[in-house]
């Protein structure tokens, strides 16, 4: 299935210098968390996290697989899920995280011929599907308009 969107998430956990990607994977695979039986793998396709002293892109599901990150508007099927590790309801993303995320998402939209307008926060995808109580994801302090503007400026 062709991926037409990139959906941006945050982990709601504080980032540090230890890898929490596997902890998120374990959480997603636990029955009753994101599905009754538990997901078969982490729900996201990619993550961006501080590992040691550098921001790294971490692999989740293969891009050709359906995700388990955003049910609304069928985005598990049509969207690539990217999770930025951090709680952006409480803090602004660091410059390093922001830049590594831009680098990743630019590559994804080039590789999938995705318009910048189809890069959406999880909460924006929920609003587009008329979800009654959309999440703040990727966080109140993660400015999706600025992220899209920075993507446009990178071309």
Image (spheres, helix red, strand yellow):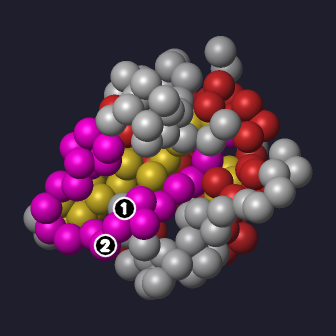
The quadrant where residue 155 appears:
bottom right
Q: In this picture, which residue range is highlighted in magenta?
A: 3-27
Which residue matches tag 1? Answer: 85
The mark closer to the camera, 1 or 2, is: 2
Q: Quadrant of residue 103?
A: bottom left
Q: Nearer the viewer, residue 105 or 126?
A: 126
Tell me which numbered mark, 1 or 2, is placed earlier along the sequence.
Answer: 2
Task: Give the structural element (helix, strand or loop) at label 1.
Answer: loop
Towards the viewer: 3 or 77: 77
Q: Is residue 87 magenta?
A: no
Residue 54 vertical position relative to residue 155 in the rendered view, above or below = below
Residue 111 in percent (x, y) is at 56, 31
Location of residue 15 in the rendering, given as x and y in whole percent from the top left corner: 28, 69
Neighbours of disc 2 within 10 Å: few (<14), some (14-19), many (20+): few
Left or right, residue 5 beside residue 17: right
Identify the residue at horizontal 41%, vertical 60% (top origin): 11
Q: Position of residue 97 (x, y in %)?
A: 37, 68
Q: Residue at x 26, y 39 (%)?
A: 26
State whether residue 100 appears in this view.
no
Name the disc covering residue 135, or none.
none
Q: Within 10 angstroms of label 1, few (less than 14), some, or many (20 or more) residues?
A: many
Residue 4, image x, y percentages? 71, 32
Say which of 37 and 112 sits in front. 37
Question: Helix or strand or loop: what does disc 2 sit on?
Answer: loop
Label tally: 2
Residue position marked by numbered label 2 in the rendering: 14
Q: Is residue 22 magenta?
A: yes
User: Quadrant location of the N terminus?
Assistant: top right
Query: Going 22% across and 44% down the picture, which residue do you hit?
Result: 22
Q: What's the distance in space between the residues labelled 1 and 2, CA to CA? A: 7 Å
View extreme (bottom): residue: 91
């Amino acid at each position: 299935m062709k991926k037409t969107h990139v959906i941006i998430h945050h982990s709601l956990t504080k980032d540090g210098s230890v890898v929490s990607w596997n902890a998120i994977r374990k959480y997603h695979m636990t029955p009753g968390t994101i599905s009754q039986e538990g997901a078969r793998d982490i729900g996201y396709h990619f993550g961006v996290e501080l590992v040691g002293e550098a921001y790294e892109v971490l692999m989740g599901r293969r891009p050709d697989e359906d995700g388990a990150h955003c049910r609304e508007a069928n985005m598990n099927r049509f969207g690539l899920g990217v999770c930025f590790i951090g709680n952006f309801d409480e803090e602004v993303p660091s410059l390093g995280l922001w830049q590594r995320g831009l680098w990743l998402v630019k590559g994804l939209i080039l590789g999938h011929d995705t318009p910048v307008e189809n890069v959406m926060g999880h909460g924006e995808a929920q609003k587009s599907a008329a979800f009654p109580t959309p999440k703040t994801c990727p966080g109140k302090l993660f400015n999706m308009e600025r992220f899209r503007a920075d993507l446009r400026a990178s071309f």
